[in-house]
Image (spheres, rainbow, N blue to C red):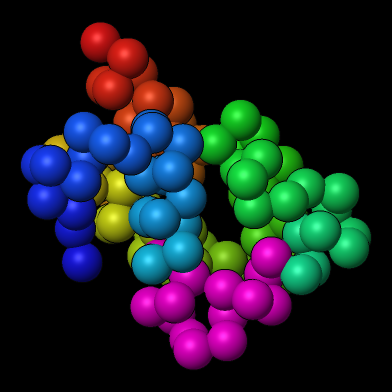
Amino acid sequence: MSLTKAQIGSVSCDERILSCVDRGLESVGRNVKNLVYWHLKKLGNIQRMDIPEKPMVFVQGLRALYRQSSLGVEKAILQEINYNFNLNCSAGTDLVAAISQAKNKVDS
């Protein structure tokens, strides 16, 4: 579900990115979002709100948790970012780069 133009105007870029991450994680499985955030907090020393500023730590945590399967999770999040920020990142684009592009697009 994307945000309306009125909602986008009142939501910060970081909040939009976090919403994309949430939806991407939820699309993989019902309890995946909570599991990932718990794992990152306990083992990776990163909280949900830190993801937009520390995307590499987030991706490293996903890869540590899901190993090869993390690519599917990253792809789901990438699709949400593409849709909600009107980007055209290919499926091979690194999630860290996509988050950076989203932030740059909003700042410009």
Viewed as shown, does residue 6 lie left or right of 70? Answer: left
Location of residue 16 in the rendering, given as x and y in whole percent from the top left corner:
36, 44
Viewed as shown, does residue 12 lie left or right of 4? Answer: right
Residue 41: which quarter of the image?
bottom right
| Quadrant holding the N terminus | bottom left
Extreme residue toward the bottom, this view: 30
Is residue 84 highlighted in magenta?
Answer: no
Q: Nearer the viewer, residue 12 or 72?
A: 12
In the image, residue 44 above or below residue 38 = above
In the image, residue 57 above or below residue 53 = below
Q: Nearer the viewer, residue 43 or 89?
A: 43
| Residue 56 in view, yes or no | no
Q: Nearer the viewer, residue 8 or 43?
A: 8
- The residue range painted magenta reads 24-37
| Residue 30 in view, yes or no | yes
In the image, residue 104 above or below residue 76 = above
Residue ID at (73%, 51%): 47
Location of residue 25 in the rendering, given as x and y in whole percent from the top left corner:
48, 70
Viewed as shown, does residue 107 lie left or right of 4? Answer: right
Q: Nearer the viewer, residue 5 or 56?
A: 5
Q: How many marks?
A: 0
Extreme residue toward the left, this view: 5
Residue ID at (79%, 68%): 39
Location of residue 31 in the rendering, given as x and y in whole percent from the top left corner:
57, 87
Residue ID at (25%, 10%): 108
Location of residue 50 in the rendering, given as x and y in whole percent from the top left corner:
66, 40
Q: Main secondary structure of the magenta part?
A: helix
Is residue 30 highlighted in magenta?
Answer: yes
Residue ID at (38%, 67%): 23
In the image, residue 90 above or below residue 99 = below
